[in-house]
Image (tube, helix red, strand yellow):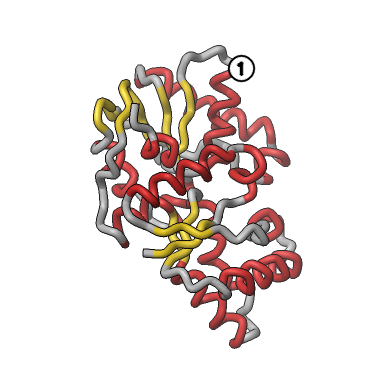
Amino acid sequence: MRVSLFVTCLVDQLWSSVGASTVAVLRRVGCEVEFDDRQTCCGQPAFNTGYRDEARQVAQRFIRIFEESKAGAIVSPSGSCTAMVHHFPELFADDAAWAERAHAIASRTHELSSFLVRVLKVDDVGASWSGKLTWHDACHGLRDLNVKTEPRALIRNVRGAEFVELENADACCGFGGTFSVKYPEISVAILDQKIEAIERSGVQAVVSGDASCLMQIGGRLSRNRSSVRVMHLAELLASQT
């Protein structure tokens, strides 16, 4: 299948190895990957902060660009940004033409693990990684996209890896985009509960499907001088150590 990579802002600007790993995994399972470098933000920061007019403008640009692609699917290494694309129709409740275009783009847009397991029916991508690891359920992926079993199935098929279910894996990490900026004390209090659970699990790495959550968790682990590393699911699945 031909797929178009929706790389997301954080991956593009701050964590490029996630994008490269996503391409590597997709190619390994037989996909032809294209990338349109005109793509920009999905509009989620504006949307979540209440700037709906601005979010609508960004969404329209996104839709126009990806409409040009003939790829069978748009795949992203982010449940959060994928969920935002699925919210696009809400921005055009009073515009039937744009709402239809938004629905069409949303129907083609998939989070990486969901695409692999639900669409391609693949739960073993030939990955290998040695050590104990756990999974953090990012809020948007879990609650907006119902992504839960898919990443776990993929992780359990990573050769050499020992999967440890995290206590309260579905609890928020406290990032929440602009929430962590507006309410830093609450954000850190929520985060510390997650960090304590990770440390109790005895793992070498915590894996998730959103760079934003991993930056939040990884920053706190680093400041606590923890030996636990953070890893995006795409990086784990691309690994063949």
Q: Where does the image place residue 172, in percent across and percent down from the top left?
A: 49, 39
Around disc 1, counting alpha carbons within 10 Å, would you say few (fewer than 14), some (14 to 19), or many (20 or more)? few
Residue at the disc numbered 1:
223
Q: Amino acid at mark 1?
A: Arg
- From the image, which quarter does the C terminus lie in? top left
Q: With respect to residue 153, does 185 lie above or below?
A: above
Total marks shown come to: 1
| Above-or-below relation of 14 to 79 | above
Which of the two residues, 99 or 23, is positioned nearer the viewer here? 23
Q: Is residue 129 left or right of residue 43?
A: left
Instruction: Answer with left or right where residue 163 lies relative to residue 204.
Output: left
Q: Position of residue 14 (x, y in %)?
A: 64, 38
Look at the picture and state if 223 lies above or below 122.
above
Q: Nearer the viewer, residue 31 or 19?
A: 31
Task: Name the quadrant containing residue 205.
Answer: top left
- Tell me the quadrant of the picture where the N terminus can be found: bottom left
Q: Is residue 78 visible?
A: yes
Quadrant of the image occupied by residue 16: top right
Left or right: 121 as drawn, with respect to 209 = left
Residue at (63% x, 34% y) in the render: 186
Could you say where residue 214 lies in the image, as x and y percent from the top left?
53, 34
Compared to residue 111, the image places residue 134 above or below, namely above
Which residue does the image show at 25% across and 31% down from the upper left? 159
Label 1: state its secondary structure: helix
Taking depth in this image into account, of 135 and 36 the one nearest to the observer is 36
| Rendered residue at 62%/44% (across/down) | 10
